[in-house]
Image: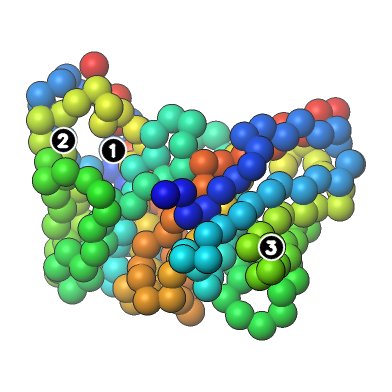
Amino acid sequence: AQSVTQLDSQVPVFEEAPVELRCNYSSSVSVYLFWYVQYPNQGLQLLLKYLSGSTLVKGINGFEAEFNKSQTSFHLRKPSVHISDTAEYFCAGRRDNFNKFYFGSGTKLNVKP
Amino acid sequence: DAGVTQSPTHLIKTRGQQVTLRCSPKSGHDTVSWYQQALGQGPQFIFQYYEEEERQRGNFPDRFSGHQFPNYSSELNVNALLLGDSALYLCASSLDPRGRNYGYTFGSGTRLTVV
């Protein structure tokens, strides 16, 4: 069963517009949630992570995400995107006592001028 | 401070052959995990090595095997290659098996194409 679900495979958006990339997790997965970005032909770079504490998490490059336990969601947001944000974004979760990540299938963000 | 280094970056193999991929962890890290990322999908966990032992394994057949050396570097071996093994193979290192506080660092991957 899919443990982390990214609802949108592709999200087109114009430059300087706000964006939200959606992620839902199953309650069996995760205490810890992450967003990674992958640029073409590169590995994964950590954007932000939720381990505990404040449910609003701020990451690099102006991204933020909110952990919502009641809705089992961890959506990624940015108020104003740039062309350079064009990439694929992966949501991932980890269980408390396990080591491996469960990744979603990814969302391709295409920022248009 | 060098990050995670993977070699080779690209590789083309024929069905039925065997392949070895290599990973050097980030300086100070002692745990290595391997992931397979098929085209259009998220990475899937293969296995993790810590203290030269396989500590956890994902849902991959025995054709996938690995090794960790005393210097913490690691190899991923795949035998009897299938077309479906074509993917980007990612290595991730961390300071301890859970990597909870110190995080994971991913390499840029090895792109394996099986023809």
Give the class, few, some or many, for how many residues have Cα within 10 Å of label 3's Cα (few <14, many ≥20): few
At 10% from the left and 36% from the top, the residue drawn is B79
Q: In this view, does A88 lie above or below A71?
A: above
Q: What element carries label 1?
A: loop
Are the residues flagged by discs 2 and 3 from a single subunit? no
Q: x and y percent of residue B71 in the render?
A: 19, 68
Q: In this view, does A42 lie above or below B101?
A: above
At 12% from the left and 41% from the top, the residue drawn is B63
Amino acid type of the residue tagged 3 in the rendering: Gln
At 34% from the left and 43% from the top, the residue drawn is B36
Tag 3 subunit: A
Amino acid type of the residue tagged 1 in the rendering: Pro
Circle 1 residue: B8
Q: Quadrant of residue A57?
A: bottom right
Q: How is the image coloured?
A: rainbow
Give the class, few, some or many, for how many residues have Cα within 10 Å of label 2's Cα (few <14, many ≥20): some
Q: x and y percent of residue B107 in the render?
A: 41, 51
Amino acid type of the residue tagged 2 in the rendering: Val
Q: Gap between marks 3 and 1, in whole Å?
A: 42 Å
Which quadrant would the C terminus of chain A be assigned to in this image?
top right
Question: Where residue A83 is drawn, which disc sits there?
Answer: none
Q: What element carries label 3?
A: loop
Tag 2 subunit: B
Circle 2 residue: B19
Tag 1 subunit: B
Give the class, few, some or many, for how many residues have Cα within 10 Å of label 1's Cα (few <14, many ≥20): some
Circle 3 residue: A71
Depth check: B64 or B2 in front?
Answer: B64
Q: x and y percent of residue A91 in the render?
A: 57, 53
Q: Residue furthest bottom?
A: A53
